[in-house]
Image (cartoon, rainbow, N blue to C red):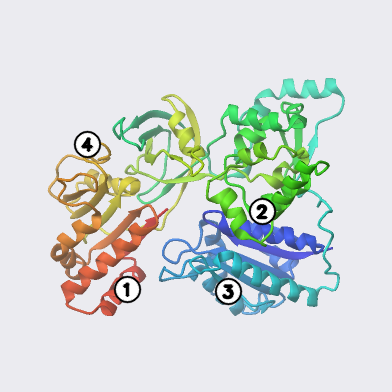
Amino acid sequence: MTDRITILYGSETGNAEEYAKYLKQRLRSYNLKAKLSTLDGFPLKQLITDTDYLIIICSTTGQGELPRNAKSFMKFILKKKLPHDLFQHLHFTTFGLGDSSYVKYNYAIKKIHARMTQLGCQELSPRCEADEMSPEGVDGFYLEWETQLIAALSQKISIVKQIDDQVVPIPEFKVIMGKSKEDEAKAFVEANTKALSDNSLLPKIYNNLRHGTVFANERITAKDHFQDVRHIKIKSKDLDYKVGDTISLYPCNFDEDVQALLELQPQWLAIADKQLRIKNLIDQEIHITLRSLIKYHLDIMSIPRRSFFSMLWRFCDNGTEDGQREQDKLREFGAFDDPEELYNYANRPRRLILETITEFSNLNIPVSYILDLVPLIKPRMFSIASRPNADEVELVVAIVEYKTILRRTRKGLCTRWLKSLEPGDEIVFSFDKSPFVIDNDSPIIMVAPGTGVAPMKSLIDNLLYQNSTQEMFLFFGCRFEERDHLIKNFWEKVPNLHIMNCFSRDAESKYKYVQDALIDQASLVGDLVCNQNAKIFVCGSSGKMPREVKLTFVEIIKRFLKVDDAQAQLFVNALEDTGRYKEDAW
């Protein structure tokens, strides 16, 4: 088995990571062992010493930006002093995930591919830029790209042959029970109860963690409003963050969900509170109980992906007709034969891993495969809603809770956890720096429906704290003035803060949507942008809002400058390219 293949990925939401994991499984079925890592997490010297074949899978986020876990890699390869033949020994290919409705479609993978070619990489197989807006979706692009990739590898590596898929692959992570003597195991657990039961692994997996205490968790929407939005305040010491930065929170599963999972697999329940030794997750061996591993680190409340099913079906007992039927169904979900099957079962109703294991009653999963199957809980990132402060940080967060098409209530793992926090509770968090820059002269136009107002609050609070006279124009949108007017009590009236409120469900509201207010103020907005060098910040949920707002700015420029649609579009595109139009949507 060759092991000189490296798969690197850049992923913001987990989609690129999923395709990378699935590809690794596929290569293993051809007796090819690949190393898998984020772009930033891979020791770059190993591209020189341990890699012959390089595969990069990367999504594009925001306005043509790289995912956060790919930016350091890009910064390195862009160094001008790097020799042009640095990677001449590498055969590589790339796969990009993008959305063609955005101007900078698949911009991240284009930049990576072009620069790696400049540094000497040779093409292994054709690169692919997948378009999620196309009829075949990303899956269609991936299948064709994977076929070409494996064909190219088979020409380079003579040992390529597909292994019988009935063979259960060796687990990637080694999960070993503690010492077999009961007295030694008992002594270990008693001596290490706290180390095994708390969240002690986080500092070994993540860097720059901080500890804080919740001192306020206030609902700022009406009790009878469908959406629960929280204004959360956290106390700590020596905090260092700036306007535009984000905070990462590290949620955990609830005890009742952990217990439910353990009871579904009785062989797990029997060892739930005994020592496990885990290798290959990080550089050093880890000691933790299974219960703590599940509670603090495994995302059992996430939607299962294809790579989950492509492994899971092997652990379904097919000794009965019912078991065979379940195994066949799980196997279908793990293949590309009918992508709609997986979508309809998992994505459309937002099924959870915990529910999936509940519904397939013939599963008998060895604990040694738990880390191969269930993804780690990823930090949840939120915009900071307070001005820089060494002792305090604030959040404005919508609690995720809704009904699926199956009429089941869904609650977001992190926001459910946030909702449960009470004053005095301790939490772990970290900061993520942003390249956000704001000058002190030109006006600022802010468009922020709902909780998109969080980073705007940080900016406004900071300028008001500095007694700045900089003109600020906030276009805020929500449903009802009396139910979810989040900013109602945030600021006193000040002469340089101009707020246009839009209430989409109030019949008497002057404006229903932020686009209405922008168009009504077209002369003002046009003058601010064209004559006063104003910067524009748009923040909120992804989907229609960012696109509609951008089209509104195009229309405003068209009217103000008396130009045609194409010229107005070019003007707005130039604003983006020069950093005067920033968009942050999730």
Give the CA distance from mark 3 to mark 2.
32 Å
- Tell us which disc is closer to us: 4 or 1: 4
Q: Residue furthest front?
A: 321
Asked if 316 appears above or below 574 in the picture, the reply is above
Q: Which residue is mark 3?
A: 113
First along the sequence among labels 4 and 2: 2
Residue at coordinates 41% horizontally, 38% vertically from top-left?
Answer: 399
- Say which quarter of the image contains residue 320: top right
Instruction: Name the spot of residue 483 as percent of width and height, x first.
Output: 26, 36
Give the CA distance from mark 4 to mark 3.
51 Å
Amino acid type for the residue under numbered disc 4: Glu
Give the CA distance from mark 4 to mark 2.
46 Å
Q: Which residue is mark 2?
A: 333
Contact flag, marks 4 and 1 (Cβ < 8 Å): no
First along the sequence among labels 2 and 1: 2
Q: Which residue is mark 1?
A: 574
Q: Which residue is mark 4?
A: 482
